[in-house]
Image (spheres, rainbow, N blue to C red):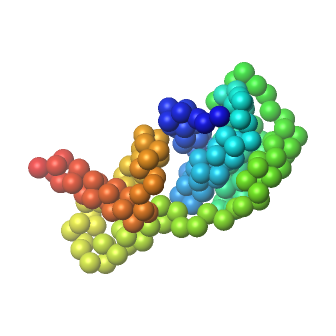
Amino acid sequence: MRLSRLQRRHYTAFLLHAMTKLTFKPHNMTKYCAIRFFHERYLPCLERKLRRSFPDETSVQFHSLLSLWIASKLHETPPLSIRKLQNIAKKLIPDHYYTKKDFIDAEIKFLEAIDFDLKTGPLLSTYIEELLSEIRGKSKEIAKLVSLELCLAILDLLYVCEDEILLATPVELTGASILYTYHRTQALAA
């Protein structure tokens, strides 16, 4: 069974929303790594394995939180604790209470489902950071008008709003988010 575009958007938006509930701002690598694990690895694997029916919404939301937890183990010092993860789950999935054992057992199943493939390759956020760095080195005026935060907010919208946009190359997406940010700030300044 395949997820609809709307369902994919919903789960990606849930994951991004969960990140806003953290008591700390996760590193960009953590954020986009979690999205990649969940959106590009876990959901397709789940679709292949479950031909007839898909798990209920709370189960998929729980697994999106697992992708955040796993990504934090790779990119945060210290990583997100189980207690913090439980608190986020309690706020966002109030119908269920997840124990530490639930998280640990589900993490193993999640990793098995993605064949323990924790490679992320280049993340779009990295391309944006690198391109902005190059722009700053060449044009101070443009660099003042384009912020990394706004570019990443646009990237978040791209992830939530349209699946097909992710088929474009990372360089195209990076350029698009930076150009849009630049044009938007120019329009606001005028």
Residue 182: where, in percent of width, then height?
A: 25, 57
| Relative to 136, residue 5 above or below | above
* Residue 141 placement (x, y as % from top left): 21, 68
Residue at the top extreme of this rendering: 95
> So how many labels did they put on this image?
0
Q: Residue at x 44, y 67 (%)?
A: 127
Residue at left 46%, top 52%?
166
Q: Indicate left or right for 99 with 130 as reference.
A: right
128 and 150: which one is in front?
128
Q: Is residue 84 visible?
A: no
Q: Quadrant of residue 132?
A: bottom left
In this view, the residue farthest toward the left is 190
Closest to the observer, 75 or 47: 47
The residue closer to the viewer here, 98 or 145, is 98
- The reply, left or right, for residue 187 in relation to residue 34 is left
Q: Is residue 63 left or right of residue 141?
A: right
**Residue at the (41%, 57%) spot, across then down:** 168
> Residue 27 placed where, x, y %?
57, 58
On the image, the x and y values in percent for residue 123 come to 52, 63
Q: Residue furthest bottom?
A: 137
Left or right: where does residue 16 sit relative to residue 180? right
Image vertical order of residue 27 relative to residue 63, above or below:
below
Q: Residue at x 65, y 62 (%)?
A: 75
| Residue 177 in view (yes/no) | yes
Quadrant of the rendering where the N terminus is positioned:
top right
